[in-house]
Image (cartoon, rainbow, N blue to C red):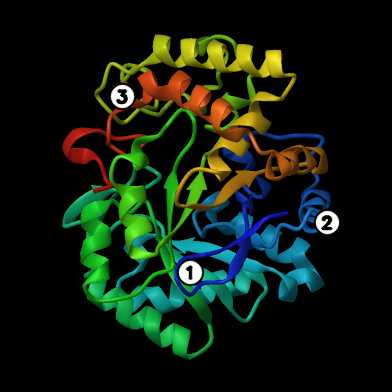
Amino acid sequence: MLYRRLGKDGPEVSVLTFGAWQLGDHAYWGESEQHDAAGAVEAALDGGINLFDTAEVYGQGESERVLGQVLGAHRKDVYVATKVLPQHCHPERLRAACEASLKRLNTDYIDLYQVHWPFAKGPYQDAGGHWVEGDTAIEEAQAILEKLKAEGKIRWFGVSNFGPQSLKTWKQTGRLVSNQVAYSLLFRAVEYEIVPICRKEGVGVLAYMPLMQGILSGRWRTVEEIPPKRRRTRHFSGRREGTRHQEDGCERLLMNTLAELRELSEVLELPLATMSLAWLMRQPGVTSVVVGARRPDQVRRNLLSAQLDLGPALTARLNTISGNLKHAMGPNADLWQSGEQARVK
């Protein structure tokens, strides 16, 4: 396993992060007879993974609860990261939200406490598509976070889905070690502005949805085969049920890109998912890649990517294959919303 420092003064973390959303949200990911949370976490520990990521919103707290339960005595040997929704960052709610996460995680401290989405002025849609009031100032939230840190309840704090404007505003009044953003071969919007800013400011990048919720596993050959809940991003037509953008999407380009990537992986006799993760782990600025799993075999398969060096020629080839899709999607780093409604700013 490879390890990198998270930000300027954060911990040394594995280049592969265990994403725990799938452990506690069956309503989104579906039921599975092979679901083995304890076995998946054990395989991650055996493979050297030392960062485990979740959020209060995943399964309405169930992901945090399951992760805290299965880590058990291993808690002291790893770093646990969770996220708080922006509407819970109001001074009257932030401490309670942190205490609730601590209780569900069955721990006395959170290693990395992340603000899940940027704050907004006036009503805005949260990650679940619900309208909430954006009534919290960054300065107020940071003051509470600093108090929680001084009390030992959190060790470091970071953000998630913060774009150039939000990062600049945060930097004016506080510190952070990381920014967790959507990043994959199929979604490279963060390369335009966000990653360069993070590299310049010494902010670690945690890349989530590196396999586009399984699309980069290669299991689906047509758009219609992809489960509806995973067809809501801006890659797909805004006319599809569940989407929140108004764009035409890039469905044909997406599937053509996938076909070319799959063909290359078959020639190399290398699983598409493994190749995709290996590419992402070695992108400039990326500290760690957050990958979800519900079974030990999935974890062990993902671990192979940490040992794989693609080399400059293959990396360049992958950049070329995914380049047209990157250009078509543009610099908007919000996977789900477009125009004035985009939250990653």
State which mark lies toward you, 1 or 2: 2
Q: Is residue 168 left or right of residue 75?
A: left
Q: Is residue 57 left or right of residue 253?
A: right
| Residue 244 x, y percent position in the rendering | 31, 31
Q: Residue at horizontal 26%, vertical 67%? A: 170
- Dot 1 or dot 3, earlier in sequence: 1
Towards the viewer: 221 or 243: 221
Label ID, residue 113 = 1
- Calculate the distance from the C-alpha at mark 3 to the C-alpha at mark 2: 39 Å
Q: Label 3 belongs to which residue?
A: 327
Figure check: 21 above or below 200 = above
Amino acid type, residue under disc 2 in the picture: Asp
Amino acid type, residue under disc 3 in the picture: His
Label ID, residue 199 = none
Q: Residue furthest bottom?
A: 151
Q: Residue at horizontal 48%, vertical 75%? A: 9
Secondary structure found at label 3: helix
Secondary structure found at label 2: helix
